[in-house]
Amino acid sequence: MIDETLRRVLDDDGRAIGAVPEIPADDLRALFRHMLVLRTMDGRMLSLQRQGRIGFYGLTTGQEASVTGSAYPLRASDWIFPALRETGVSMWRGTTIQQIVCQLIGNSGDVLIGRQMPMHFSDRAVNAVAWSSVIGTQLVHAMGAAWAAKLTKTSDVMVGYIGDGGTSSSDFHAALNFAAVKQVPVVFFCQNNQWAISVPIESQTVSSSIAVKAVAYGMPGIRVDGNDVLAVIAAMREAVDRARSGGGPTFVESLTFRMGGHSSSDDPTRYRDPALVATWEKRDPLARFGAYLKGAGLLTDADVETWSAEINDAISAAVTAAEALPPPGIETIFTDVYATMPAHLEEQKKHAIARGLGTTFDGAFPL
Ligand SMILES: Cc1ncc(C[n+]2csc(CCOP(=O)(O)OP(=O)(O)O)c2C)c(N)n1
């Protein structure tokens, strides 16, 4: 059996109630600032979506500690297999705000040159692997890459991300079983934000937790307060260290709450009680970590004000620069498939360029 007790370092008011993980002061401040970036991006990008300037957005609001805490213990050489709410992990690893805005627009500055849905970010430069909207697939990909890492004897760790809803997919079971059988260096990180669009966790599973499911596969399961960045870091460190030292996979359930809609296409007031949302507002991850840092003399209100202004300016500059870029050139739809392009595609490419065809998209995304 596993201990299903929720691991916490901070209480709801940001007072330390557990062992505080060792983290340099500058990093603690950087972690808070990153959480502020994610919160600010959500507000600004949702507003752009409402103005019709981007087609789709998926919010991280309420989950900033879970996202940022899961990223911190990783090395640059480790690989992430993200889903909808982990763009902030790539950003912690070096992806810029402008790269994200370009991806949301799908223009020529987009590292994915407009080939993915908005918010479906990945980039080789930060070892973030491409993903599909099909929930759960990231885990089998992470497990497979971890098996490759074991066979090739690298010391890299793979992290597969999933939501609570994704744990009902067959890929979840295949990945956990295989990872444990092969004892591969992978961490399965589940952001249990308690909603899969309009389906609450109670309708998703009747297990006593999601973490307990790890028992059946023969791997350690950890249940951590996902609104407590220090607790998430401690849990993730344990899991990553185990994977890197040959101890095999770990399943981490990070208990959090999706404060906004599933995406910019969703209206959560149609299916959930505002009183429940209000309860989780009191456990706000930024407020809790901010209070802790202020108490430790590591953060002031002036820092938060300065950082907010800087972040807003950076977002404004990124949006202006991104909106000035043209769509990807028509020639890009012919690249990256064949090492040597077949003659008939060469021919089509010539015609497309000669006719000046564009690749603009102004539709709406359904999910
Ligand atoms: C296999 C599959 N089934 C259904 C869907 C439709 N769908 C898109 S997102 C979503 C909910 C995902 O919820 P969860 O896994 O909890 O992650 P969250 O979005 O809350 O982070 C569903 C059912 C899908 N994309 N893939």
Image: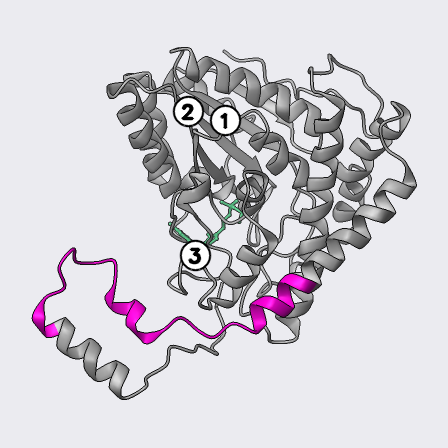
Q: Earlier in the sequence, mark 3 or mark 1?
A: 1
Quarter location, residue 156: top left
Q: Nearer the viewer, residue 217 or 151?
A: 151
Looking at the image, which residue is at 42% across and 40% down?
Answer: 168
Residue kind at label 3, given as amino acid type: Val
Of badges 1 and 2, nearer the viewer stands 1
Q: In this orientation, does residue 250 appear?
A: yes
Question: Looking at this rendering, what residue extends furthest in the left direction?
Answer: 343
Left or right, 43 with respect to 188, comes to: right
For marks 3 and 1, give the CA distance: 22 Å
Looking at the image, which residue is at 82% across and 38% down?
Answer: 287
Q: Are marks 1 and 2 in contact (CB under 8 Å)?
A: yes
Q: In this orientation, does residue 267 appear?
A: no
Q: Is mark 1 within 8 Å of ligand 1?
A: no
Q: Earlier in the sequence, mark 1 or mark 2?
A: 1
Residue position for label 1: 75
For marks 2 and 3, give the CA distance: 24 Å
Residue kind at label 1, given as amino acid type: Arg
Give the percent coordinates (x, y) of residue 337.
Answer: 21, 58
Q: Nearer the viewer, residue 181 or 37?
A: 37
Looking at the image, which residue is at 53% across and 70% down?
Answer: 55
Determine the secondary structure under disc 1. loop
Q: Are marks 3 and 1 in contact (CB under 8 Å)?
A: no
Residue position for label 2: 157
Q: How many marks?
A: 3
Q: Residues within 10 Å of mark 2 (few under 14, many from 20)?
A: many
Of badges 2 and 3, nearer the viewer stands 3
Determine the secondary structure under disc 3. loop
Residue position for label 3: 111
Q: Which residues are magenta?
A: 317-344
